[in-house]
Image (cartoon, rainbow, N blue to C red):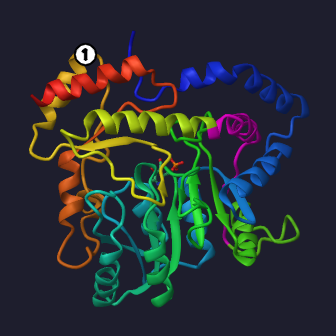
Amino acid sequence: MSIEFIDLKAQQNRIRAAIDSAIARVLDHGQYIMGPEVYELEERLAVLGGVRHAISCASGTDALLIAMMAKGIGPGDAVLCPDFTYTATPETIALLGATPVFVEVGLDTFNIDPAGIEAGIASAERHELKPKAIIAVDLFGRPADYDALRTLAARHHLFLLADAAQSFGAAYNDSAVGSLADVTATSFFPAKPLGCYGDGGAILTNDDDLAEIMKSIRLHGRGDDKYDIVRVGVNGRLDTLQAAILIQKLSIFADEIERRDAVASRYAAGLRDRVAVPAMPDGYRSVWAQYTIRLPGHDRDRVMKALSSQGIPAHVYYPRPVHEQTAYRDYPIAGNGTPNATRLPREVLSLPMHPYLERAIQDRIIAAVLAALE
Ligand SMILES: Cc1ncc(COP(=O)(O)O)c(C=O)c1O
C-alpha cells in the first residue's frame, strides 16, 4: 500500500456524500459567482478566525495582494518579510512595485525573528525606502510571535499582515489565527489544512473601513453602484462551488486539527532524541500544515533516498531562501545577512502529515527515519 504525503482521498471518502449534495445544490440554484454559499462561508470563517470580517477571495496570493492594495502599498515602500517562505509572500510585494526586505528567521520556529525587524527597517531606510508593513508568515502551520511583532509594528507605525496560508485554524495565546494581526490572509489550496478543490483564499480583519475597501478591490474596485469603479481592483472572487465544498470541510475541521496534533505528538515522541523536531512552546497551537524536522549534521540526501526506497514520501520545503532565488536576488536583506534562513534549506525535511495517517504507517515512517540516521 502506498503512503500518501497528504491523503486528500481519505478525507474525501469521509464526507463525499455531503460534498456531492453541496455541489448539486449549487448546480440547482445556478449562482456560480457570489452565490449564497460564499456569504455563509464568510460568516463561518469570521467566527473561526475571531474577527468581524472574513472576505473570501480567489487564492492566498490574492488575499495578500488585496490586503496590501487596500493599504496603498506601492513604489518607494518597503515591506519586511521572512527570508524563508513560499514565493507568494515576496511576489505580492514586488507585484505592487514595493520592495521586499528579507528578514532573518528562527532556526526552531522557522518564522520571522522579531529581533531582525529593526535591522530590516534600517536596511529599508538605507535604500531610501519607506518601511510600511511587516508580513509575518506562520510557516508550516505554527503562528509567528505576534506579541513581539505587534509591539514592533506599533512602535514603528507599520501595518502587520499575517500570511496565514498554512495556519488557518491555529492559535496563539488563546487567540485564533485571523485575529492576531491587522489583516490576515489565508489560502484554501487543496493541500492546506483547510483546502478546497481548486484555488481559494480569504482575508480576515476587525478593521471595518479596510474590510469595505478589500471587498471593493476583490470586485474590480466597485463602488456602491456596480458600474461605478471607484478604485483599481482585481477579479478576486471565490467560486460558489469552492465555498460550498469548504462549508462541508469545516464540519470536520476541528476534529482534523486534533488528529493532526496527535500525529505531530507521535512524531515528536519517536524522533526527538535523534533529530530536531518542531518546537511548540506554551501558547502556540499549530495546525501542522507540514511536519518538518531538521537534520543538522546528517546526510539528508541519504535519509531521503532510504525513505524513498521504502515508498515513504518526504519533501524539502523550501530548498532555497528567498534571497537566493533568481527573481529576488537584487532586493535588500536585513542586517548582516540571514544565516538561519540560509541554513534551513539544507537541513529541513517534511514528513507525511495528514489527519488520516494510521499509527502503524507512522511507526514505519519513524522507524525508517531512525534507521536511515544510523
Ligand atoms: C506561506 C504561503 N503564502 C502564500 C501562499 C499562496 O496561497 P495560494 O496558493 O492559495 O495562492 C501559500 C500557498 O501556496 C503559502 O504557503
> Does 251 appear in magenta?
yes
User: In the image, residue 53 lies at what x, y percent?
Assistant: 74, 64
Q: Which residue is mark 1?
A: 310
Residue 159 vs residue 344: left or right?
right
Q: Quadrant of the C terminus?
A: top left
Residue 273 vs residue 83: left or right?
left
Q: Residue furthest top?
A: 1
Q: Where 102 sits versus 195, above or below? A: below
Q: Quadrant of the N terminus?
A: top left
Which residue occupies the foreground of this view, 364 or 76? 364
Q: Where 205 sits versus 265, above or below? A: below
Q: Where 43 sits versus 259, above or below? A: below
Q: Label 1 amino acid?
A: Gln
Which residue occupies the foreground of this view, 160 or 330? 160
- Residue numbers of the magenta segment: 232-254
Secondary structure under tag 1 reads loop
> Does 283 appear in magenta?
no
Residue 157 vs residue 48: left or right?
left
Query: For the point 51% across and 52% down, which residue is it?
Result: 167
Query: For the point 17% across and 22% down, which residue is it?
Result: 306
User: In the image, residue 209 lies at what x, y percent?
Assistant: 74, 78
